[in-house]
Amino acid sequence: EVQLVESGGDLVQPGGSLRLSCAASGFTFSDYWMSWVRQAPGKGLEWVANIRRDGSTKNYVDSAKGRFTISRDNAKNSVYLQMNSLRVEDTALYYCAREDNWSRNYWGQGTLVTVSS
Amino acid sequence: QSALTQPPSASGSPGQSVTISCTGTSSDIGGYDYVSWYQQHPGKAPKLMIYYVTKRPSGVPDRFSGSKSGNTASLTVSGLQAEDEADYYCSSFAGSANWVFGGGTKLTVL
């Protein structure tokens, strides 16, 4: 059974940093691109970043460029999102998702990031 | 990276059909067949319902179907059931390694 479990969400002040983790199981992790998608409270979904199977290619939404870094450790079956210079508007539930067939076919339950003073 | 446009709400009675539209541009929906649809129940993670515009993942009922014409994609739910009441989001590849989602449509089963 495919499982994705996010962790690392917390309350942080504007300008602060946070590192999110996503532990994967139930599939060959290194065979898949992985994504982070966020959802602000009461709002819709927003793609944040994705990373190639071997970690060699990383893509970001414009608002995350220069502040967020996606990475992965295939030996640990994990993907990460390092978030720096956090803003109030980054407050959201952050989902980890597995990519397949140009879509996201498995999602975790999310980890909540709150940016507030 | 503008969001795709969806109607905020849609509704239908049990057994009826309802179609949700998703409008983009020639740079996203119109340019690629990488349109997908997601169902999200309150407090739950999104679930993939349609990919490659028309394809259903294993386990998704054939009451759900997708289509595309020009810059607009559509999700049709036939034979509405109470458990279909949820939020639905479209998504498309937008070129230059970018992805966009729609704002979401709340489907109510009357």
Image (cartoon, coloured by chain):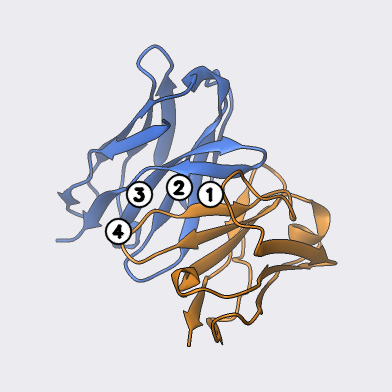
Chain B rendering hue: orange
Are marks 1 and 2 in one subunit? Answer: yes
Q: What element does badge 2 sit on?
A: helix
Q: Which mark is residue A94?
A: 3
Tell me: A68 left or right of A16.
right
Residue A11 in the image, given as x and y percentages of width and height: 16, 52
Direction from residue B54 to residue A14 in the image, left or right: left
Which residue is at a point 75% across and 55% down the rendered structure image?
B54
> What type is the residue that disc 1 sits on?
Val
Task: Sort mark 2 into few (<14), some (14-19) or many (20+) by Cα contacts within 10 Å.
Answer: some
Residue A53 locus on image (x, y percent): 56, 22
**Is A23 above or below relative to B101?**
above
Q: Colour of chain A?
A: blue
- What residue did someone put label 2 on? A64
Q: Does residue B11 appear in the picture of this structure?
A: yes
Q: Are marks 1 and 2 in contact (CB under 8 Å)?
A: yes
- CA distance separating discs 4 and 2: 13 Å
Residue that lies at the very extreme toward the top in this rendered image = A75
Say which chain tag 2 marks: A
* Residue plotted at (25% across, 40% down): A18
Query: Which-is-in-front pick, marks 3 and 4?
Result: 3
- Of the image marks 3 and 1, the number of the one nearer the N terminus: 1
Residue A81 seen from this side: no
* Subunit that carries the residue with mark 4: A
Is residue A50 or residue B10 the one in the foreground? B10
Q: Which residue is mark 1?
A: A61
Mark 4 lies on residue: A91
Residue contact at pointers 1 and 4, CB within 8 angstroms: no
From mark 1 to mark 4, how far is it between C-alphas?
15 Å
